[in-house]
Amino acid sequence: MEILSGLNQTEIEKITDELKASKFRARQIHNWIYLKSVSSIDEMTDLSVKFREELKQVAVVTDIKIKTKQVSSDGTIKYLLEFSDGECVETVLMRFDNRANLTACVSSQVGCAVNCSFCATGKRGFIRNLSYKEIIEQVLTIQRDTGLKVTNVVFMGQGEPLLNLDNVLKAMEIFNEDFQIGARRLTVSTSGIIPQINKLADFNMQSTLAISLHAPNHNIRRQIMKIEDKYNMEELKKALKNYVNKTGRRITIEYLLIKDVNDSVENAKELAYYLNDIKCNINLIPYNPTEQNDYKRPSNNSVMKFKYLLEHSGKKVTVRLERGADIDAACGQLKGKVC
Ligand code: SAH
Ligand code: SF4
């Protein structure tokens, strides 16, 4: 059985050719999959009943299962999705008040090998990469379930996207071409895998690169992110400058604020100094509690003070709104509970 979700126009044409149908039929199927996001071939109502029956003999829309779905009081929806081999990942849909945007936060791997000390995903270790089809299926599932069209995709779910770069790039191409989501509405977040950042720079993508920096210096970073021992902040800085030079794009720096670990006045000044010559915006993320560690979230007051000090350096600074914390859907809380 062919699975239609994830196929491009040419691949769908191979199926319609075999069924001796026209390329126009392939175009119709493509629209039903990506723009109207139907769950079954029977819903493709501009195809004749006879042709739908023939198509059903050789293809299905999807084989992904929604294991659980939780809706937060702020409207955020978290799905636990199951793939054909029984592995599961979480996908989150976020809506922001007063904005038409619908943002899907997708996973790129089952588990994660980077194992940052503050993150629930890393605690499971690395299980496997997702295929590009499994990545785009997450957005299709949201669209099928809600009947809404996703406008933005962030690779901020489970996994390190740059350690699954080929599938992530292919998925981004499909988001762009088949879903018609503009490149600037796609964001890839990474813990800082330097060789892959350089590779991305050579692609000259117009999407947004977000870096999970989370520390103002080497010593603090290596305490909370083991990856710092492999790819340190000084080398990372060179890669970021190279990225900006090649793409002309402004980078997003993500900075997790953990009480008494990296949130002092001194830390803010040191961070501003490090970022001084990098073209970037800064996104502060107050720590969201997870079961596995003793870290604490700083008070709103100290978050605002940190923000103010950074703004003083001339950078644009935002504080990430906490979404879906009541259903463990906020940043760092996704663990892909074993089915
Ligand atoms: N692996 C990539 C993509 C995941 S993005 C990366 O790390 O960038 C998820 C974001 O949430 C990252 O910035 C991550 O550092 C952050 N995060 C992880 N644990 C968190 C927690 N407990 N509270 C808030 N943010 C967290
Ligand atoms: Fe992996 Fe990102 Fe979590 Fe670190 S923060 S363990 S890189 S998913």
Image (spheres, rainbow, N blue to C red):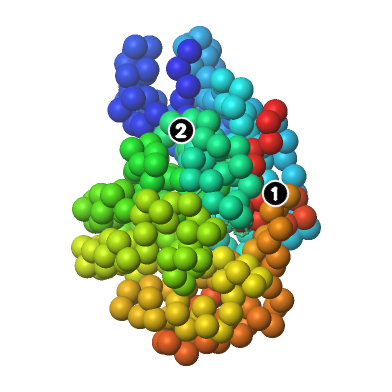
Residue found at x 57% / y 44%: 122
Residue at the (37%, 59%) spot, across then down: 232
In-image side of 288 versus 212 (left or right): right
Nearest the eye: 69 or 278: 278
Residue 157 placement, left or right of 327 = left
Name the front one of labels 2 and 1.
Answer: 1
Secondary structure beneath dot 2 equals strand
In whole angstroms, how far apart are the C-alphas of marks 2 and 1? 24 Å
Instruction: Write down the residue under mark 2.
Output: 129
Q: Give the crowd class for mark 1: few <14, some 14-19, many >=20 residues within 10 Å.
A: few
Q: Position of residue 175 (x, y in %)?
A: 41, 45
Quarter of the render that holds ligand 1: bottom right
Q: Residue furthest bottom?
A: 312
Is 122 rendered above or below residue 214? above
Number of disc labels: 2
Residue 43 in the image: state x and y as whole percent. Answer: 59, 28
- Residue 267: x and y in percent read 52, 78
N-terminal label among 2 and 1 = 2
**Where does label 1 land, which residue?**
292
Tell me where residue 131 appears, x and y as whole percent: 43, 31
Seen in the picture, residue 29 relative to 164 is either above or below; the reply is above
